Image (tube, rainbow, N blue to C red):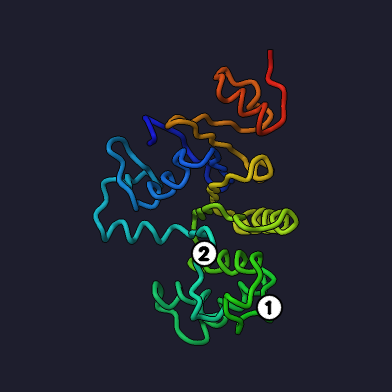
Amino acid sequence: MLDHVSFSVPQGKTTVIAGGSGQGKSVLLKLILGLLRPNSGQVLVGGKNIAEMGYRALQEQRMRFGVLFQGSALFDSLTVFENIALPLRERTPLKGEEIKARVHATLEQLELNGHEEKYPAQLSGGMKKRVGLARALQLDPEIVLFDEPTTGLDPVMTREIYDLFTRTQKRLGYTAVIVSHDIPQVFALADQIVLLNRGELDVFTDPSQIPFSTKPQIREFARLVLGQQTAV
């Protein structure tokens, strides 16, 4: 449960939300998308309160988002091309050659050329993440949400995916929000870190600030997870 938490996400930057299991990381993403409604308070996106929107307004607002789901959430019965093209077919008036051109441009950007006719079962874990990101970017989102994007990947592939995220975000300039338990590796991507613990949160602009927190639980986190001695 989240208790009177408050933070802002800087535009065009990467915010990492971290914490243990059951601390509310994925709940925050669902609140941002309007999949859950808070009992009190506001969830502001572009100055508009998601928590008060009706269905139609919420659907329009969600067009501003891209989402890379945990496990990528690809459709097994669709090829890579069809998975990536799906948002364009469902949410835009684009047809035929226009969709083909958009998808192939994304395939090239994310180094997926030659894989467009494959099915998800034929892809490695890292390739599935690339396809999931490609699909999330098809509607040119202002904000991209990542839910545990490196789950199931080995350390080498995790580094490759993080490098991909960094390059893509810098090239396209979207606002990124990454929920992850991959600490401290994921902190290398962050312009801002949000740590969740027992319904409360703390915000840091640099991992080096964490050991200097005045809260005992954050200092213990730095010692155990980051392997850093806390300040005396």
> Tag count in the figure?
2
Q: CA distance from mark 1 to mark 2?
A: 17 Å
Q: Quadrant of residue 57?
A: bottom left
Q: Give the residue at x 52% y 29%.
A: 202
In the image, is residue 108 above or below residue 96?
Answer: above
Q: Secondary structure at mark 2?
A: helix
Residue type of the residue flagged with mark 2: Ala
Toward the right, the furthest residue is: 156
Q: Please tell me which of labels 1 and 2 falls first in the chain.
A: 1
Categorize mark 2 by other alpha carbons within 10 Å: few (<14), some (14-19), many (20+): many
Q: Is 41 on the left or on the right of 6, as rendered?
A: left
Q: x, y percentage for residue 62?
A: 38, 58
Which residue is depicted at the point 68% across and 78% down? 113
Q: Amino acid at mark 1?
A: Asn
Q: Quadrant of residue 87?
A: bottom left
Q: Is residue 47 above or below residue 162?
A: above
User: In the visual, does 160 lie left or right of 83?
Assistant: right
Q: In this picture, is 99 found above or below 218?
A: below
Q: Position of residue 41 (x, y in %)?
A: 31, 35
Q: Residue under circle 2?
A: 136
- Quadrant of the rendering where the C terminus is positioned: top right
